[in-house]
Image (cartoon, grey):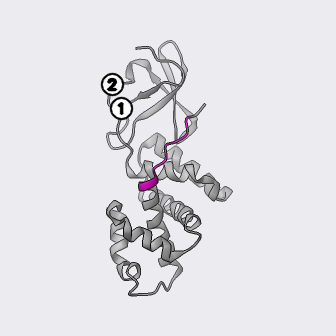
Amino acid sequence: MNIIKGSIVTIDINPNASNTFLVDTVEDTTLLLKHPLSGDVLFRVLKTDVNRVGANIKDSTERTLDYVNANRADLDANTRDDLDGLALIFVKNRNLTPRQKQILAQIGGTIASVKFRNDLKAAMAYVVRNQSVLDEFNLLWFNNFKPLFLGRSQVTSQKQRNAIFNIAGHVLAELENPTAPRQK
């Protein structure tokens, strides 16, 4: 197996998340790998440990991280720092805690607010049209707010407004799913 800088390899980290990395440096017996979500962090692995498993498709968390990374220009500096921290934690652990997932959802909601030009009705209509892509968590929120989404009730709080944009952010991430730019 000929592995060179820039090769895409897989390593067995977690069966539930993507496991593809880019080769940054080739050494005698080891490789330094980086993940597209956190290209500034290198992982040293033995050459014999790569390409022993098939590539896994991105899970919902990674798709959301990928989406918000692709739209990071819509975020302020502090939120970009939070995003970088979440991406690093995910790349290392292949998982986020419920609180970290909540922060990621809020970041996605911020981007959705920008994408929909802060138009709550447009965001709700988009979610209703695409509700089939909602995961269990977002479907629960959608069902809780169904009267709002169907126009039977009015949004009366900032918490409701934020939750709706967070759901819209999830839908955008699921449908747009950009690929992470290749790190050089």
Q: Which residue is mark 2?
A: 52
List the single residue furthest toward the top: 28
Dots 1 and 2: beta carbons under 8 Å? yes
The mark found on residue 12 in the picture is: 1
Q: Nearer the viewer, residue 9 or 177?
A: 177
SS label for mark 2: loop
Answer whether residue 177 is magenta in the image.
Answer: yes
Residue 78 lies in quadrant: bottom right
Q: Main secondary structure of the magenta part?
A: loop
Residue kind at label 2, given as amino acid type: Arg
Type of residue at label 1? Answer: Asp
Q: How far apart, in angstroms, are the residues tagged by discs 1 and 2?
A: 7 Å
Q: Please tell me which residue is depicted at 41% across the width and 48% down the height of the picture.
A: 95
How packed is label 1: few (under 14 Cα within 10 Å), some, or many (20 or more)?
Answer: some
| Left or right: 94 as drawn, with respect to 117 | left
For the N terminus, the image quarter is top left
Q: Is residue 36 left or right of residue 97?
A: right
